Amino acid sequence: MNGKQTRFVTPETAVQAVRSGDWVDYGFGAGFPELLDRALAARKGQVRDVKIRGGLVIRPRIEVVESDPEQESFSYYSWHIGDYERKLQTRGLVRFLPVMLRSLPTLYRERYIRCDVAFVPVSRPDADGCCGLGISNYAWRTILESARTVIFEINERYPRLQGVDGSHRVRLSEADYVVEGEHEPLPERTYREPGETDAAIARRVVELIPDEAVLSLGVGGVPYTVAQMLARSDRRDLGCHTGTISDPFLELYQAGKLTNARKELDAGRSAWNLAMGSQRLYDWLDAEPERFHPGDLDYIHSVERISRLSNVISINGGVQLDLMGQENAESAGARQLSGIGGQMDFLEGAYRSRGGKGFICIHSSRLDKEGRRRSNIVAAIPSGSTVSAPRTMIQYVATEYGVVCLSGKTLRERAEAMASIAHPDFREELARSAAENFR
């Protein structure tokens, strides 16, 4: 930062700090600097080659992208393709940056990448001039220390929690400029009612979750259904240490299941990096801040820290798995669908946790555009597709037809196990491939 006294200015004044050739960080997830984004978009034609980084954006519009489809002034880079960014991608307006989230702070600290200007969304300040990081702790602390210019955008709608020992706190004095104004309602991520396949997978996984489990739930139908079933179960004293806290955890809390009472770390508190869900979720964070430890990527995604917790249960989805257990979690051929995010972090953490289990949950098959059934368990990950997690990191795989543990199995045993939980239409073909390739 440039050391100037913090100044409250208009968004239009603040974005004058952005120069041609700069890298500008927008953050990650549901937190988004909408006033600064709009003001920067208005500078189209005044600057060139400004590169914006973000990821997993769930609001319906990024103004710098929409206002400049020719990319004369701005280009947009994403760490993790969200639903809206996927639509931009089909128009050639997103450039994907592969990253394992636990390694992202190192990229900034060691100057593999740079941030010239940070647009940091924060909550309303308290009487001491301290703000919370709202719904996206991300790696903001690390980014603030490396940026040339820091601009805070106060969002009056954010939850005001500041975290354990200030883990979610920034001071107005840390910013070069501060902007404020009226914001749109916070973006919400909703869940559809689970289908029969999601419910069948979830039932099998829930059977393997013990009392006092510490949950890391990905965002999707199966994790949500698992949480609903746990809320109605006889499980006791469940905990939360997760990349993204979402409505499933709120449901567990309301059912009296989420107490965090038995965690070796952060006892009594749910630990998370991002918040993404309904307004009810955001209201919960605001009303009961003492129940949470919002931490940065270095804290939440640390494999060493996760592994110090007992009975860590990591539940994530995938796109495809092959007979060896290699997982494609993020692409259809060369087309990027999402990103690896923190999946590897929590898979490894669960593997190393005493009593821990890492689950990849996947529908055994899908229907293509022509209505033909395709297997999501394949003989080999197709050429061009991503191998998101290696076979050595996959512990449990669940489909609607069963759950298999791949740990300690030979290639032949893995292949036979994977074929056994495939859709019946493909089992014979997959078993034949296993016999031919893994002797």
Image (cartoon, rainbow, N blue to C red):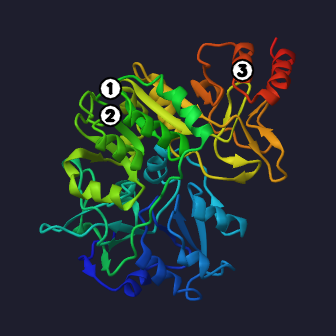
Query: Which amino acid does the dot numbered 1 rest on?
Result: Glu
Going from the N terminus, do you reach mark 3 or mark 1 first? 1
The residue at which mark 3 appears reads as 420
- Tell which of 85 and 54 is nearer to you: 85
Tell whether label 1 touches label 3 (CB within 8 Å): no
Q: Compared with residue 54, is residue 361 higher up or lower down, i.e. above or below?
A: above
Q: Is residue 375 above or below residue 42?
A: above
Identify residue for label 2: 239
- Disc 1 designates what residue? 212
x, y percentage for residue 409? Answer: 65, 13
Q: Secondary structure at mark 3?
A: helix
Q: State which quarter of the image contains the C terminus.
A: top right
Is 137 displayed left or right of 102 in the figure? left
Q: Quadrant of the N terminus?
A: bottom left
Q: Quadrant of residue 311?
A: top left
Q: Nearer the viewer, residue 346 or 16?
A: 346
Q: Residues within 10 Å of mark 1 (few under 14, many from 20)?
A: many
Q: Residues under labels 2 and 1: Cα distance?
A: 7 Å
Q: Amino acid at mark 2?
A: Gly
Do the residues bearing badges 2 and 1 touch, measured as CB atoms within 8 Å?
Answer: yes
Q: Position of residue 180 (x, y in %)?
A: 31, 79
Q: Please tell me which of labels 2 and 1 falls first in the chain.
A: 1
Which residue is pictured at 40% across the width and 41% down the height? 242
The image shows residue 289 at horizontal and vertical percentages of 22, 52
